[in-house]
Image: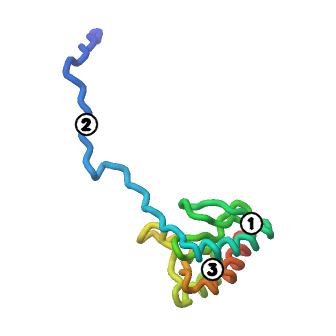
């Protein structure tokens, strides 16, 4: 084989490749903020569960509660979300006002439900079930 001859360096000016909007990285959706009543009710629940060994943390920039390092409840706008076992999940989904938890529209999180502030009377029971499930 004949020896390779080195290539000459390009003298053309370097230009950046054009990028289109479709190539841009997707922006994370803005998470809804909890109102004062939701924050107050979450804080009350948090106090009870922190006394039992849970810890406060963040998920998607929203306040959550963890047990053993696993998230079991949190706020999402003026609602709370809960991670439930199969039986509790099925029962919860049948309740009025309870929806699948979709932090990104169309992408429901498995084992999670979202309960609006209008049904806050259910939060304590669901938090208890979620805490038991992840503990």
Q: Which residue is mark 2?
A: 17
**Relative to 64, is 25 on the left or the right?**
left
3 vs 1, front mark: 1
Q: Which residue is mark 1?
A: 54
* Residue drawn at x 70%, y 74% as measured from the top left: 44
Tell me if residue 126 comes above or below residue 66 in the rendering. Answer: below
Q: CA distance from mark 3 to mark 1?
A: 22 Å
Q: Which residue is mark 3?
A: 86
Q: Residue furthest front?
A: 36
Q: CA distance from mark 1 to mark 2?
A: 50 Å
For marks 3 and 1, the one nearer the N-term is 1
Closest to the observer: 27 or 23?
27
Pick the quarter of the image with the C terminus: bottom right
Tell me if residue 77 comes above or below residue 20 in the rendering. Answer: below
Closest to the observer: 25 or 118?
118
Mark 1 packing: few (<14 Cα in 10 Å), some, or many (20+)?
many
Question: Where residue 29 appears, x then y in whole percent?
Answer: 42, 61
Q: For mark 1, give the secondary structure.
A: loop
* Residue drawn at x 72%, y 63% as measured from the top left: 55
Q: CA distance from mark 3 to mark 2?
A: 50 Å
Question: Where residue 47 appears, x then y in whole percent?
Answer: 74, 70
Question: Where residue 106 appears, x then y in whole percent?
Answer: 41, 71
């Amino acid at each position: 084989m004949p020896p390779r001859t080195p290539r000459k360096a390009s003298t053309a000016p370097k230009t950046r490749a054009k990028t289109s909007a479709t190539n841009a990285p997707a922006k994370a959706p803005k998470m809804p903020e909890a109102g004062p009543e939701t924050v107050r009710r979450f804080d009350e629940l948090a106090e009870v569960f922190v006394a039992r060994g849970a810890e406060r943390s963040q998920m998607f920039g929203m306040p959550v509660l963890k047990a053993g390092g696993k998230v079991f409840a949190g706020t999402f706008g003026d609602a709370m979300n809960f991670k439930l076992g199969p039986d509790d999940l099925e029962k919860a989904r049948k309740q009025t006002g309870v929806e699948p938890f979709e932090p990104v529209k169309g992408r429901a999180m498995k084992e999670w439900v979202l309960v609006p502030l209008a049904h806050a009377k259910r939060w304590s029971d669901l938090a208890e079930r979620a805490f038991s499930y992840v503990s």
